[in-house]
Image (cartoon, helix red, strand yellow):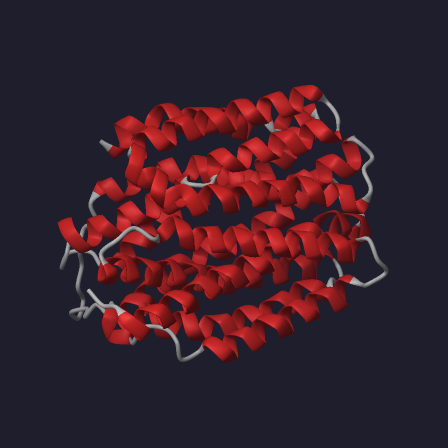
Amino acid sequence: MFQGDEYRRARLATSIAFIINGFSVGNFVSRIPDFKSELDISNGVLGGALLCASVGVLSALRPASRNSAKYGSGPVTKYSAFTLALAVPLVGLLFNLPWFLFSLFVYGVLSSVHDLSMNSHAAAIENKVGKRVMSTFHAMWSLGGLSGGAIGGLVASTNISIRAHALGVGVFIFIIAIITRNWFLPAAADQHVFEKHEKRKTPGKFAILGLLGLCAALGEGAAADWGGVLARETFNSTPFMSALPYVFFAFTMVCGRLSGDYLAHKFGVVKLLTWSGLVSGLGLTGGLLIGNIYGVILGWFLFGIGLSTVIPMVISATGSLANEKYSGQVSAAEGVALVTGVAYFGFVLGPPLIGFLSDLMTLRWAMLVPAGLAIIYGFSAKKVLS
């Protein structure tokens, strides 16, 4: 265990890392309707384009986990923040559809490296300090997404171009990366020494945890990617109103995650996730049935409450398993990578699935899929986590 200035600096740096990662996503999500309109593409094509980002995320998870374990999650988090700052303006250039696909893949890769390393660093801090703090870190991600979505929505309602917007976000992240670069834990805090040609079998428990996270990840990705499009095209909302479903979703994600560590301690993880699944699934379904922009906002609000604690609780459980039950067999970074790899497949599956289904049955009814998955993870929590 450790305390004092070292802990405070590392926790602050990690919190800021989560914030800037969420901030980049929030700003990106707020401009998705504008990407669609400027490129003049259908929902199905947009879903396929968003798939490129998800493929980039997944393709980077394994090498990112190895590097985080080999070099320490602190240094990798530090340097990957600079590459994230460079990736954001690439997407904003928006030359044409092929460029959009390429830039989304690059953004997915670099965002994934930053995401994996900061989660590994959060697990290292939990292990060192000896208490649950993962949900609070993820609240910072949601806070970044909330502020990014709100700012992005305001920018979208002005005449500021996507290119200028993306460049501004990239410069902001770059400045923050410079300021926080020396605040992380040293590499030795969670380095794992690999033997040459080392081959190890990862316990199946991690994959099972990942499946629980997959249900939440698909819902989280769907809420982020399609809320603005649903509001804009189905209910003819203004650019600012179209950003509100995600803003309310991100707001409840912040509130839920800020209280997640306390609620998990008080009621237990199983009970927390069971009720979370029911609230999110039934809440989103009810909002969609209302059939107007206010129903969408309400649905996204309740959906955020339910989804908020799933991913951080799953990652926290992964870090604990790796450090306690499987110490020496699997590093925390590798365990987190496996679980997030399975869970983040929801982000890969979600965009094209919702886009394809929306072309068949309208976007409004396609969103019942993530609502149903939320109910499934709610009823599955006890079996998975027991």
- Tell me what residue is drawn at x 18 percent, y 67 percent: 197
Q: Residue at x 77, y 51 (%)?
A: 34
**How many numbered markers are drawn?**
0
Task: Point out the residue furthest to the right here.
Answer: 159
Q: Is residue 236 above or below residue 261?
A: above
Q: Residue 242's spot in the image, x, y percent?
A: 74, 42
Image quarter where the N terminus lies is bottom left
Residue at 59% from the left image edge and 60% from the top image edge: 24
Depth check: give the residue in front, 35 or 13.
13
Nearest the camera: 101 or 74? 74
**Image-based side of 332 in relation to 360, left or right:** left
Say left or right for 241 vs 78: right
* Quarter where residue 84 is shown: bottom right
- The quarter of the displayed image where residue 333 is located: bottom left
Answer yes or no: is residue 348 visible: no
Q: Nearer the viewer, residue 184 or 53?
A: 184
Q: Is residue 337 left or right of residue 152?
A: left
Q: Position of residue 27 (x, y in %)?
A: 65, 57
Q: Quadrant of the C terminus?
A: top left
> What residue lies at 64% left-to-right and 74% top-to-bottom?
171
Where residue 302 appears, x then y in whole percent? 56, 31
From the viewer's perspective, is residue 32 above or below residue 168? Answer: above
Residue 134 lies, with reference to residue 244, above or below; the image says: below
Where in the figure is residue 6, as x and y percent of width and height?
31, 74
Residue 243 is left or right of residue 348, and the answer is right
